[in-house]
Amino acid sequence: MPTLLAFAGAAVFEIAGYFAFWAWLRLGKSAWWLAPGVVSLLLFAYLLTRVESEAAGRAYATYGGIYIVASVLWLWLAEGVRPDRWDIAGASICLIGAAVIIAGPR
């Protein structure tokens, strides 16, 4: 599985899983929201193990940058809150850092 696809899928499943818990605890949704949330978090963990990296810590660190960008997109697309320039700047910095970690010469 290509690394970028694994990272993107993991981000979607992680954010969706956490949002299910958020919806239950903070938005007053039914506890039934937890079932798809748990499944989503399991899929997140599985996909993150599919990343092509020799070291788990490096894969997780890189994923952190991808996760931040995906979270800002979730903010905009799922929650309807348009990211401001600070959201975009911070996410961009994190994505550059993720690229350095995963693609740096070793």
Image (spheres, rainbow, N blue to C red):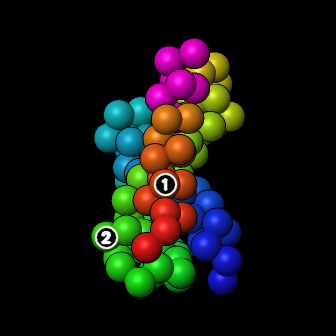
Q: Position of residue 34 (x, y in %)?
A: 41, 59
Observer-side mark, 2 or 1, equals 1
Does any portion of residue 4 appear in the rendered image?
yes
- Amino acid beneath label 1: Val
For label 2, count other residues whose C-alpha is less than 10 Å away and answer few (under 14), some (14-19) or many (20+): few
Answer with left or right where residue 38 lies relative to residue 15. Answer: left
Name the dominant secondary structure of the magenta segment.
helix
Classify mark 2: helix, strand or loop.
Answer: helix
Give whichever of discs 2 and 1 has the lower sequence position: 2
Q: CA distance from mark 2 to mark 1?
A: 14 Å
- Mark 1, residue position: 100
Question: Which residue sits furthest front?
Answer: 105
**Quadrant of res 49:** bottom left
Quadrant where the C terminus is found in the figure? bottom left
**Quadrant of res 9:** bottom right
Q: Nearer the viewer, residue 18 or 88?
A: 88
Residue 56's label in the rendered image is none
- Amino acid beneath label 2: Gly
Answer with left or right where residue 75 lies relative to residue 30. Answer: right
Q: Nearer the viewer, residue 39 or 63?
A: 63
* Magenta region, residue range: 84-91
Does any portion of residue 63 appear in the rendered image?
no
- Mark 2, residue position: 57
CB atoms of marks 2 and 1 within 8 Å: no
Q: Establish if 70 lies above or below 105.
A: above
Q: Position of residue 37 (x, y in %)?
A: 45, 61
